């Protein structure tokens, strides 16, 4: 009886660990490309600046560093280097992540959409 409970507990932990390891973390850049369509109103996929800065090469780039774009002091002084984690926080709530930034966006609430969007942005070189 004890060994059956141990095996059942092991299976439960194994299944839950697998669900936790993949749920919300699987990246789908193609889905992210679809999500980006809403961003394309303000952001270009290359280095061209529009209402927002161009996003080519955004992963690994220091926030507020695109030449020719007029950033807020908050963004220029944020010290952020864009990666999946910093993008996730910013995309969820731009004003919470960088108070005083000029991005007029309430945030992307769906964590899978944010992860997939970051995966797509990582493909832009």
Image (tube, grey):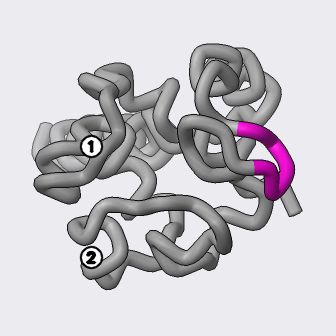
Q: Residue 20 carries which label?
A: none
Q: Is residue 87 visible?
A: yes
Mark 2 surroundings within 10 Å by alpha-carbon count, few (fewer than 14), some (14 through 19), many (20 or more): some
Q: Which mark is residue 94?
A: 1
Residue 73 in percent (x, y) is at: 26, 70
Residue 79 in percent (x, y) is at: 32, 84
Most common secondary structure along the magenta stretch: loop
Magenta part of the chain: 44-48
Is 115 above or below relative to 49?
above
Q: Give the residue at x 12% y 48%.
A: 96
Looking at the picture, tell me which residue is in the foreground, 14 or 77: 77
SS under mark 1: helix
Does 50 appear in magenta? no
Residue 83 in percent (x, y) is at: 52, 67
Going from N to C along the chain, the mark reached first, 1 or 2, is 2
Q: How far apart are marks 1 and 2 (CA)?
A: 12 Å
Quadrant of the rendering where the C terminus is positioned: bottom right
Please name the residue that numbered disc 2 is placed on.
78
Q: Give the residue at x 79% y 50%.
A: 48
Looking at the rendering, which quadrant does residue 35 occupy? Answer: top right
């Amino acid at each position: 009886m004890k060994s059956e409970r141990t095996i059942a507990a092991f299976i439960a932990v194994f299944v839950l660990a697998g669900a936790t390891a993949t749920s919300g973390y699987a990246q789908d850049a193609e889905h992210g490309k679809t999500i980006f369509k809403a961003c394309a109103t303000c952001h270009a996929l290359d280095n061209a600046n529009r209402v927002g800065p161009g996003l080519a090469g955004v992963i690994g780039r220091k926030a507020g560093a695109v030449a020719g774009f007029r950033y807020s002091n908050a963004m220029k002084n944020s010290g952020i280097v864009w990666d999946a984690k910093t993008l996730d926080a910013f995309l969820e709530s731009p004003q919470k992540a960088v108070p005083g930034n000029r991005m007029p966006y309430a945030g992307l609430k769906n964590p899978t959409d944010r992860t997939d969007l970051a995966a797509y942005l990582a493909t832009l070189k």
